[in-house]
Image (cartoon, helix red, strand yellow):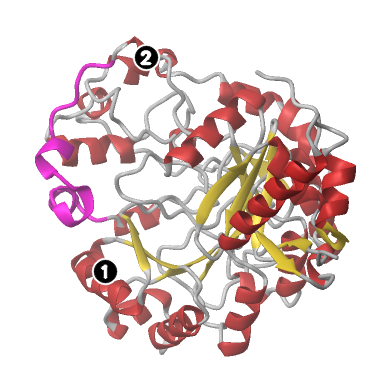
Amino acid sequence: MTKKIYVARSPRIAARMLGEEMLVMSARESTLFTLNPTATILWKAADGDTPLDEIVERRICSEFEVNPEDALQDAEALAEDLAKHGILLISEQPITRAGALVQPAQPEFAPR
Amino acid sequence: MSVLLQEMSERALRLGVPLSVQLDITYRCNEQCVHCYLDHNDHGEMTTVEIKRLLREMADAGVFILTLSGGEIFMRKDFFEILECAREYTFCVKLKTNAVLIREAQAARLRELGVQSVQISIYSHRPEVHDAITKIPGSLCRSINAIRFLKSQGLRVILANVLMSVNMQDHHGVRTLAEELGADYTLDPTITPMMDGDRSILQLNAGESALRELFRDEAYVGNAEEFCAPPPPPDESSMGSLPCSAGHTACYVSPYGEFYPCVQFPLSCGNVRQQPFLDIWRNSPQLREVRAIRLRDLSSCSQCAHGSTCTRCPGLAFSEGNMRGPSMLDCEKSYARTGIPSQNLLAQKGKPSPARLVQIQIVPAIMGGRLSAISSAPSAA
């Protein structure tokens, strides 16, 4: 049986939705990133408690027409990439601390 | 500014999002700097509960970069509670402080909380000069110790060097100090009026010859010949350009909840104690007026040779009497840079300098950090 992977938002990053994209600033690298819609879904769902395969099944496969195995492989690669930049934490155990990060509601903005 | 951040700013502008806010959490301070424009007495700061509610409102409004400043931020006993709350809302938090109260424990906590940068005011590498400006003996030593604590935690530290006549010769020393400490360096040669309109501290500003020398220092401006070259005439694009981010993607909130377009723009647009943050941002008539300003609308500046390159600050112009009028401090900078007098300087010749202006007669009022890189246009945060 494959080991479960847990992902959590790093407590040392800053993040905010701007339009359709997620802005993420890594304090470690002082670098600004933008996440595409798939990465944004993964980042938002990364509560430290939900295994990555469940996130892919519930949040990604339900949203996009993708093969679940391919989607999981892509998600694992994406999670590793985000972890390299200090944006996500990855563990084989549930990660509790980062789950405290609050994601505020975003208002509707009318373009000026 | 990075290309990506520039793109984000443009997107925020299109969407009407307040991407960046400076929040001064107190005007109280443990230093008494000679050039400071603040009234350091507490006239009714927002409570912890009020600030936490404001943070929630700002996060909901889409604010991403949050600069906490003052006054001295560590004078608030609830500073870390405020910071923890700000980080729970995933703001990109930048701090402005004199760092005198930062020790190992505070530095470690700042790192744990994922603060993006800590900007520290340093006036000179020489204690006798720095301490004379802050009026606190030993303050330079304490600030430098704090910088070492912060750097040992791997935090990004920026030394902010406000320049005036008394420390004008020391910028290379402070820059070298920054390099030795592994910190970034920024300088600002502009002293602005007191919050009550008293302009006497403007006498501390460095003179034109000192500015001219600074603007030709390639350590700061890159190619000096290019930087000081006569400006090209303003074209249609610059006529329609925005003066800065104030009120467009950035704003400022005082410790008393007053909402302004920028820390240097003392035009009250509302109070977050009485009105939701987003409501003020979207509906304030004052902000609409600020947002309508374009170079072509400025009677004197639109005819000026410096129109396309001037760093004219609408907030300083407002302080001089008219947000669509000149900012003489910027006219003087343009002159020092290029040797070409601005339209406003030519018109001003022979006239007395601006009289004492009362920007805000009763508290709450504005103020806070106002340091910016020498070569950048005035901007909030």
Q: Secondary structure at mark 1?
A: helix
Q: CA distance from mark 2 to mark 1?
A: 36 Å
Residue type beneath disc 1: Arg
Residue type beneath disc 2: Ser
Which chain contains the residue that carries disc 2? Answer: B
Q: Is residue B248 left or right of residue B149?
A: right
Q: Is residue B80 visible?
A: yes
Q: Mark 2 = which residue?
A: B237
Label 2 with label 1: CB-CB less than 8 Å = no
Farthest-out residue, front? A1
Which residue sits at x=62%, y=88%?
B105
Q: Mark 1 = which residue?
A: B175
Same subunit, labels 2 and 1: the answer reads yes
Q: Secondary structure at mark 2?
A: helix
Report x, y in % for residue B155: 51, 72
Question: Residue B104's image quarter?
Answer: bottom right
> Which is nearer the eye, B200 or B65?
B65
Mark 1 or mark 2, which is nearer the start of the sequence? 1
Q: Is residue A36 left or right of residue B182?
A: right
Which chain contains the residue that carries disc 1? Answer: B
Report x, y in % for residue A67: 79, 37
Region rendered in magenta: B206-234
